[in-house]
Amino acid sequence: MYSSPLIEQLVEAFRCLPGVGPKSAQRMTLYLLERNPNGGKKLSEALELAIARVGKCSRCRTLTEEDICTICASRSRNRKVCCVVESPADIYAIEQTGAYKGLYFVLMGHLSPIDGIGPDQLGISELIDNVAQNDIEEVIIACNPTVEGEATAYFIAEQLRGEKALVSRIAHGVPVGGELEFIDGGTLSHALNGRKQMDLS
């Protein structure tokens, strides 16, 4: 079978993306090389620049090229409410609903001892300090409704037990086992508006 080392290398590179198998990676590779080399060049340049310059917001830990992201820097946001999410993709999903005007804290994952992901990796101590130092009145836990997400949400609620802030969990209009970035805006908006205080008893 005909094979070009550079083409195979590009196919393998595309396979690092979630949900992209060998056939999809091959289609994308051949499309860029055959029909849209300028698009491929733009993609390459944008990706290289983003990897070099994008880091984490020093306040909420979302991805940004600035020290403080635009949401944390905005004076129009409600600075007394903090929504805890697992990933930057969740922020995009919530922002699209227009139903939430507070700040965020991004865990960059969920508790997973098997994978070596504990409270330190998720920055949970930073979250607790942030809540205490900034007089946050409500912490909305919007972890994904998966087993790991539920465990993470409960752990965070336990850590916040001694704080003055009300701890709430988004309502389960979001299907169990789903992930926020794939939920439609109406369902997500309803889940945010119907959040309830977590019962730790």
Image (cartoon, rainbow, N blue to C red):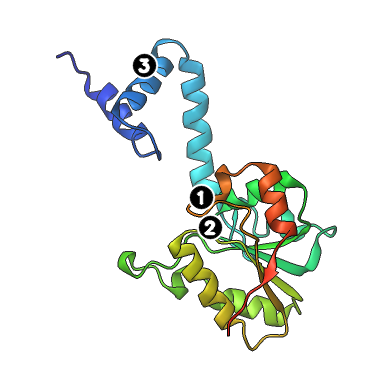
Q: Which mark is residue 30?
A: 3
Mark 2–mark 1 Cα distance, whole angstroms, equals 7 Å
Question: Amino acid under label 3?
Answer: Leu
- Which residue: 40% across, 11% down? 34
Q: Is residue 112 above or below residue 44?
A: below
Q: Which mark is residue 178?
A: 1
**Circle nearer the N terminus (2, 3):** 3
Can you see residue 122? no
- Which residue: 67% across, 47% down? 187
- In percent of width and height, residue 71 lies at 73, 55
Name the quarter where the C terminus is drawn.
Answer: bottom right
**Circle nearer the N terminus (2, 1):** 2
Looking at the rendered structure, the secondary structure element under dot 3 is helix
40 to the left or right of 73: left
Q: Which mark is residue 14?
A: none
Question: Amino acid under label 1?
Answer: Gly
- In percent of width and height, residue 112 lies at 38, 66
Q: Nearer the viewer, residue 153 or 163?
A: 153
Question: Amino acid under label 2?
Answer: Asn
